[in-house]
Image (cartoon, rainbow, N blue to C red):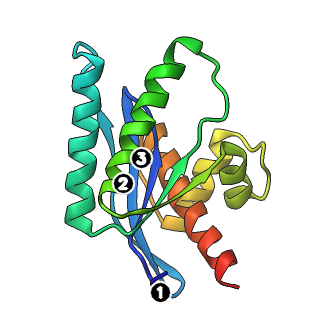
């Protein structure tokens, strides 16, 4: 485990994939990128999966990412999206593994607990903590906020593992 790895936080999906890339140095974050891969709703699922893999691979290579925190699929409100999201998550994991990125998974409860101290915190509380931790302002998509939260959670988990 390197001292200050470049971490990617991922909120998986097939319509939108939230991504956050950063490195924690001493006590400050260096946020390298945060974005949402938005796939074309009119494209086939396979075309959408390919877009996700291609864009993720470009980021892995550009930023030399060594570790990933990915949100696990806990449960689904909408059963019709469960399979495509699971498949997209598989594509994401395969892309990370192909590039030797170490993967850790976190449930939404673990992410919320890590950021707010309360596993059942609402989205607003999580967003507030993400913005405070990373000194962010302006409009940020929910999926990207979730990816930023996952990135922060992963770093906190790394710190605990080291101690």
Q: CA distance from mark 2 to mark 3?
A: 5 Å
Disc 2 packing (10 Å; few <14; some 14–19; many ≥20): many
Residue bearing the label numbered 3: 93
Secondary element at tag 2: helix
One can see residue 39 in this view? no
Front position among marks 1 and 3:
3
Q: Position of residue 120 (x, y in %)?
A: 78, 42
Q: Is residue 115 left or right of residue 150?
A: right
Which badge, 2 or 1, comes first in the chain's sequence? Answer: 1
Q: Is residue 138 left or right of residue 42?
A: right
Residue bearing the label numbered 2: 96
Q: CA distance from mark 1 to mark 3?
A: 23 Å
Secondary element at tag 3: helix
- Residue at x 30% of width, y 38% of height: 37
Q: Nearer the viewer, residue 162 or 33?
A: 162
Q: Position of residue 90 (x, y in %)?
A: 43, 38
- The quadrant of the rendering that contains the C terminus is bottom right
Which badge, 1 or 3, comes first in the chain's sequence? Answer: 1
Verify CB contact (< 8 Å) between mark 2 and mark 3.
Answer: yes
Q: Which mark is residue 136?
A: none
User: Can you say whether 126 is above or below 101 in the image?
Assistant: above
- How many numbered discs, if any? 3
Q: Nearer the viewer, residue 131 or 18?
A: 18
Residue bearing the label numbered 1: 3
């Amino acid at each position: 485990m390197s001292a200050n790895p470049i971490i990617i936080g991922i909120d998986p999906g097939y319509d939108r994939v939230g991504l956050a890339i950063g490195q924690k140095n001493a006590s400050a974050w260096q946020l390298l990128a945060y974005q949402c891969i938005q796939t074309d709703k009119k494209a086939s699922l396979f075309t959408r999966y390919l877009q996700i893999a291609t864009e993720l691979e470009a980021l892995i290579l550009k930023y030399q990412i060594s570790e990933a925190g990915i949100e696990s699929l806990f449960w689904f409100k909408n059963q019709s999206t469960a399979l495509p999201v699971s498949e997209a998550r598989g594509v994401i994991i395969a892309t990370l593994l192909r590039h030797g990125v170490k993967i850790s998974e976190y449930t939404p409860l673990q992410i919320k607990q890590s950021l707010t101290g309360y596993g059942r915190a609402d989205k607003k509380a999580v967003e507030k903590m993400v913005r405070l931790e990373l000194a962010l302002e302006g409009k940020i998509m929910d999926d990207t906020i979730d990816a930023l939260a996952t990135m922060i959670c992963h770093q906190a988990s790394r710190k605990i593992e080291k101690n």
